[in-house]
Image (cartoon, helix red, strand yellow):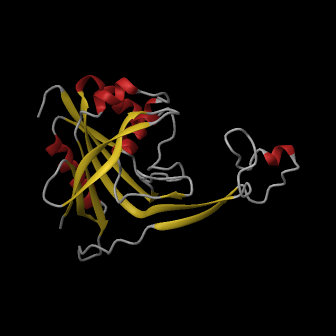
Amino acid sequence: MSTSTQYLLLWLEGPLQAWGHDSKFGVRDTLNFPTRSGILGLLCCARGAGGPEVEWLAKMNDMSMEVRAYARTDHNGQPYLRGPALCDFQMVGSGYDDSDPWQNLLIPKTSDGKKAVGGGTKMTYRYYLQDAVFAVVLEVPQQQAESLSDALQNPVWDLYLGRKNCVPTELIYQGIFGDAGTAWQQAGILAESKRRSLSYAITEGEGDGDIMTLNDVPVQFGPQKRYRDRRVTLQERG
């Protein structure tokens, strides 16, 4: 433990969550856990920071982050099986009259404002986690701990669980702690009160479990987003 850092406990709970790391316009997928870019983006929303944030991200990307998933349990304490991701099919730009100047603005076009190839209507498939609960313990610099704590409790912009339609049903900010162990103890207490049991954990680096490479470390936000890779390990628990 470093005396120059503290640890934020974030609780992510809601009927729908979406943590895409390789999404395109037509197919917007979701991982089974929050991404680093998603968590740092959430903090930027709380801070009201909408620019590139290059210097801030460089500092935050050196901080450790661990995610734990909690499954719903029955009255006997047995976890329910995790349900499949929800697929939401949407038509973008459908049903508008292109001869009407106002309705025409709602039809997708090319970057130079011309009609899109094959017409203006576009089909999209969007995937969501259902009834998921995650705890995130994020290391933060000591000098930013208080300001981030205040921002999460009084966010400048609305906070979402990935996409903007994924509204949390519990307070995201659950405290700031001097060490990760104490933060995880508090997460366990909260999970028990909600009849949730630890299902799996995502740790940074290579360990015992399923190792994967994610392109979810944000180097730059804003209109020209840039990311780099990291290795994480998914460990089944329970």
Residue 43, x across and y down, in percent = 40, 36
Residue 22, x across and y down, in percent = 43, 52
- Residue 195 in view: no
35 over 14 or under it: above or below: above
Residue depicted at 53% across the width and 33% down the height:
223
96 over 55 or under it: above or below: below
**Count of marks placed on residues:** 0
Say whether residue 83 is left or right of residue 175: right
Q: Quadrant of residue 148?
A: top left
Q: Nearer the viewer, residue 140 or 178?
A: 140
Say whether residue 183 is left or right of residue 50: left
Q: Nearer the viewer, residue 47 or 234?
A: 234
Q: Quadrant of residue 56?
A: top left
147 over 229 or under it: above or below: above
Residue depicted at 50% across the width and 30% down the height:
50
Residue 112, x across and y down, in percent = 71, 38
- Residue 203 in view: yes
